Image (spheres, helix red, strand yellow):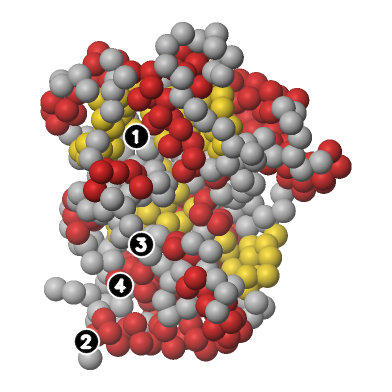
Amino acid sequence: MSALQSLEVAIHAAWRERTPQSAAWHERAQAALVGGVSGTVRFFQPFPAYFEGGQGAHVTDIDGHDYIDCFLCGACLLLVHRAPALMDAIAEGASRGSLILNPRHSTETAEMLQALVPGAERVRFLNSGTEAVMSALRFARAFTGRAKIIKFLGTYHGMEDQMLVGLDGRANVLGAGIPPGAVEDIIMLHFGDEDALHAALAGGDVAAVLMDPSMHHGGLWVGDGRFHHAVRDMTAKAGTLLIFDEVIAGFRLAAGGGQQHFGVTADLAVFGKAFSAGEKLGAVTGRADVMGVADPSGRSKGPFAFQSGTGNDTTVAQLCAQAAMRDYAQRQADGGYDRIGALARRLGDGLVATFAAHGLALHANTLGPIVRIFMINGAADYDRASITNRKQLNLFHLALLTEGVLTIPGSNDFFLSFAHCEADIEAIIAAAARVLTRFDFVGAVEP
C-alpha cells in the first residue's frame, strides 16, 4: 500500500467514526436518490454528510456536529443560513401566493438589477444559472446571426450539453450522453491568450465570447483584469458580443459583480446562486437592443428568440432577490466587501503558513470572498494546477470535515459569507493545523 493509499484509509476511517448517522442515511438515500444525493457536486467518497439545518455561517449534520460552513450550498448563501431579511421575504411571499401571472414584483426586481448592475438595460428572469447561460447564448446567436461561441478552458457554465466541454483544461466532454454535434460550435481557448482570441475572432463567425470574470472553476487565475479589458476591446471590434457569466462573480466581487469589480461592461450578463441568496432564480441582463430579440410584442425589429418558463417569477424567489440586493448595496456602501475580501486573504495566507510549518507547499488564490488552494511546489499557474493530482488535496478537505469545517472534497473551494468573522478564520486555520498533525500528509507527497 502506498503512502497516499494509507493516508486515504486513515482519513476515511476517521470520517466513518465521526458520522455513523450519515453513513446509515446514505445507505437509505441510495435506494431513492441516484447516488444518495441530488447532484454530482454534493457527493464525495466514502459517503457524503447529511445535514439537519443551518444558522448564520454554521450548519449541523445529522450526527449532531457543528461545522463552519465554507461550502454555502455551492456559494449560494452569501447572506448565510436564515438571514433575517430573507426570512421576512419568505414569509411575505407566502402571504402573496407562490406563483402569480405577471406580478408587479418582477418589474421591481428588474428595476433593482438595473440600478445595481452595469449595463443592465433590460432583464429577463429564469430559474437557474444554467438556464440563464443557455438563454444568453441563444440571444447572442439570434442577434448576431452567427453560431460559434468562444469559452475558456477550465470554466464551468452550467450543465447544458454545449457547455460541458473543456472543464478539465483540455477539450474533453464531461460525462456520457452528450452528442458530438452539441459542442461543434464551441471554440475553446486558454484564458489570457490574446493572440489566439484575435485569430478566433478574425473569421467573423463568432456570436459571443462567454467569460466567467472570476475564472472560478479554473482556479481564480484572473490576474489584474487586463485580459478582461482586452477581451472587451477585441469583441467590440469584431462585432462579437461579450457575455459575462456572473453566477459566481455576481454580488460576490462587488454589489455590481465582476463588471463593477473589473471596470468592464459586457453586452450580456447572467446571474444565479447569490442573486436570490439561495432561492431558485436566475437572470439575463444586458443591452436593450440585444435583449430585444426575446421581445414577444413585435416592437423589436429582427429575429425573435424564444425564452419562457413557468417559474421565472416565483414570488418567494423574487422577494428574496430584492432583499438580497438591498443588502448587497448597503454592504458596498459601508465597506462590507472590503472586509470580506480581507478575511479571505487572511484565510489564504494562514493556510499557506500552516502548510509551510508542517513542511508542505501550498499555493492560495483569493478573489473577493473566495479562496482556492493548490498543493503545488514552486511556481504556480493555471497550466500546472490543471494537471496536478488532486487526490491528496481532496483528502485534506475530507479531513477538514472531521474537524468541523465544511468544504466539499473535489471542489477545492472556501466560500466566505458576510457572517463569517475573524474567529471563524482562526478556527479554520487551527483545524487545518490539527489535520496536518493528525494525518501523514508529508509522507504522502508524490515526488
Q: Secondary structure at mark 2?
A: loop
CB-based contact (under 8 Å), mark 4 and mark 1: no
Find disc 3 in the rendering and name its residue. Answer: 353
Q: Mark 4 belongs to which amino acid?
A: Gln
Q: Mark 2 belongs to which amino acid?
A: Ser
Q: Mark 3 belongs to which amino acid?
A: Ala
Residue 44 screen position, x and y as percent: 43, 72
The alpha-carbon separation of the residues under discs 2 and 4 comes to 12 Å
Q: Which mark is residue 211?
A: 1
Residue 347 screen position, x and y as percent: 45, 55
Find disc 2 in the rendering and name its residue. Answer: 2
| x 58%, y 64%: residue | 68
Which one is nearer the viewer's eye here, 136 or 421? 136
Which one is nearer the viewer's eye here, 446 or 111? 111
Task: Give the label, 4 or 1, closer to the camera.
Answer: 1
> Which is more N-terminal, label 4 or label 2?
2
